[in-house]
Image: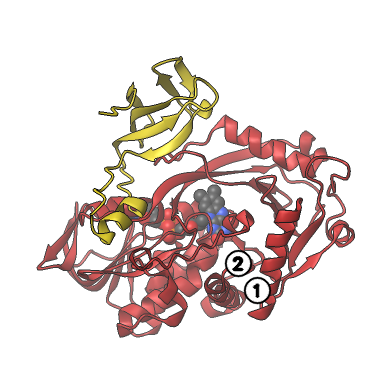
Amino acid sequence: MAFLLTCPNCGDRSVYEFRFGGELTQRPKPDSSSNDWTSYFYDRRNAAGTQKEWWYHKFGCRKWIVAARNTITNEVSETAWPDLG
Amino acid sequence: MLQLFRKERMWEKRPLKDRYDVVIIGAGVHGLSTAYYLGKLGVTNVAVLDKGYIGGGGSARTTAIIRANYLTSQGVLFFRESLKLYEGLAKELDFNIMFSQLGRLDLGHTDSSIFGLRQRAEINQLLGVDSRMVGPKEIKELVPAIDLREGKTLPIIGALHHPPGGVVRHDAVVWGYGRGAARQGAEIHPFTEVTAITQENGRVTGVETPDGRIEADTVLSATAGWSSTIAKMLDLELPIVTHPLQAFVTEPLKPFMRTSISSANLHVYVYQTDRGEVVVGGGVDPYPTYSQRSTLQTLESLAGHALEMFPFLGRAKVLRQWAGLCDMTPDYAPVMGRVDGLDGFLITAGWGTWGFKAAPVAGRSIAELIATGKTPDLIEPFGLDRFRKGKLVNERAAAPAAAIH
Ligand SMILES: Cc1cc2nc3c(=O)[nH]c(=O)nc-3n(C[C@H](O)[C@H](O)[C@H](O)COP(=O)(O)OP(=O)(O)OC[C@H]3O[C@@H](n4cnc5c(N)ncnc54)[C@H](O)[C@@H]3O)c2cc1C
């Protein structure tokens, strides 16, 4: 199902202007075990429900944003600039 | 009137018991095929549970292309065996599965795609799979209606021809396996959703459903696009992301081609069914979702690409379009077998956009694993632990075409 994403810069835009960048994950500390790194690389929650995820506004302002989307209904409840803190 | 068509029931509805030797979650082609081969090995106290109707998931939405012309030796050996089982399946199940061995052409339009196809031809031949390279002349002989795109962007300069590939009647495979499994004693319970998985001391002991708790020695998840929702019940994450795949079909046309065609460069595959309809599909949608609604954007892009090879199809009407869920893995290979640290639980997943053709060999192999406790050689490369061991299969490798059905 197609839907709109609200780019904090450009406003409501078709999802086809964006590139999906994967669910938000926590990068392990450099000295973490190889199991943790493997998980980080490959394992995904792949939630059926709301998940936070990366999107890149490829055919727009070319900025990365973070959206909260319900993966069952494709409703986007929130979009924001990434917290790079 | 109904009696005319249905002389006997395919399987009896039976009351849900509170204990089975094996509970299979998901009554798609994989769950039912596994139940069937379990029966052949004498394991008959089996229940197959589905939250919806039988074969209503990916198995209802598949374009049912069967082939064995893969790229990796692990993949070729596995799919070769499945193709062989499909060739004998109508007889085995005493059910017409309408396997039409149309043959299959994987088109190459660039030097690099020809390189990938050549590599597949070599590996296929080495492993006894009938595939070879053909040039534009032979392509035109096989499919006179095709536009070879001479002088255009992405001309068709060669193809991998795989004569034993074809298409099968998907519902018939599901029903045939279901009937076969039930005749051997397995029970099939549609509209019975698994809501939780019970565990004791690192061992899975059964499942919970709205109709009550069920104990089992072995629980198998055969839920394809929903696999991560089952894994979540066990606090597991899988190397799987659920993407929709869409396809559409035109009104029936006079037969104009026998061979099924795929082009990785044009992102599309096309074949004409025995009824004359033209089936068109492509790659998965670019973002994950559990929604099975189709989109206009994908219809437009699939249709546009189909017209690049068959311009005259522009006048054909679209009959219907649909979407189904695909459990995509990072290396385009399945995930089958045990889960480390969790006894009594097995998974068959990672079927992505290629899983229908695997159902016979996958079901037989998983059944053997359940019955004997030993992982058959054919599926050993596809264990979940390959990610920890750094032994990805990389079925996509040099040829993205391999990722298409
Ligand atoms: C459009 C499309 C085209 C395709 N084309 C091809 C092709 O040409 N060739 C090919 O080889 N493959 C193709 N595939 C892939 C193939 O169809 C699938 O890999 C295959 O059907 C998966 O079968 P399955 O039995 O594993 O899963 P499904 O058929 O998806 O069955 C899983 C079942 O699990 C059930 N389930 C989920 N959660 C629960 C729960 N909690 N409790 C109980 N039940 C549950 C679902 O209701 C569903 O019925 C295609 C897929 C799609 C979508």
Q: Quadrant of the N terminus of chain B?
A: bottom right
Instruction: Give the residue type that dot 2 points to.
Output: Leu
Mark 2 residue element = loop
Above-or-below relation of A44 to B386: above
Q: Is residue A51 left or right of residue B30?
A: left
Q: Of residues B124 and B290, which is closer to you in this image?
A: B124
Ligand 1: which quarter?
bottom left
Q: Quadrant of residue B389?
A: bottom left
Mark 1 residue element = helix
Is there CB contact under 8 Å for labels 2 and 1? yes
Can I make out residue B183 in this image? no
Q: Quadrant of residue B32?
A: bottom left
Which percent across, then down, holds residue B13? 32, 63
Q: Colour of chain A?
A: yellow
Q: Colour of chain B?
A: red
| Residue highlighted by disc 1 | B123
The residues tagged by marks 2 and 1 sit, at their Cα atoms, a distance apart of 7 Å
| Residue highlighted by disc 2 | B71
Q: Label 2 neighbourhood size at 10 Å, few (<14), some (14-19), many (20+)?
A: many
Question: Nearer the N terminus, badge 2 or badge 1?
Answer: 2
Above-or-below relation of B145 to B390: above
Can I make out residue B194 in this image? yes
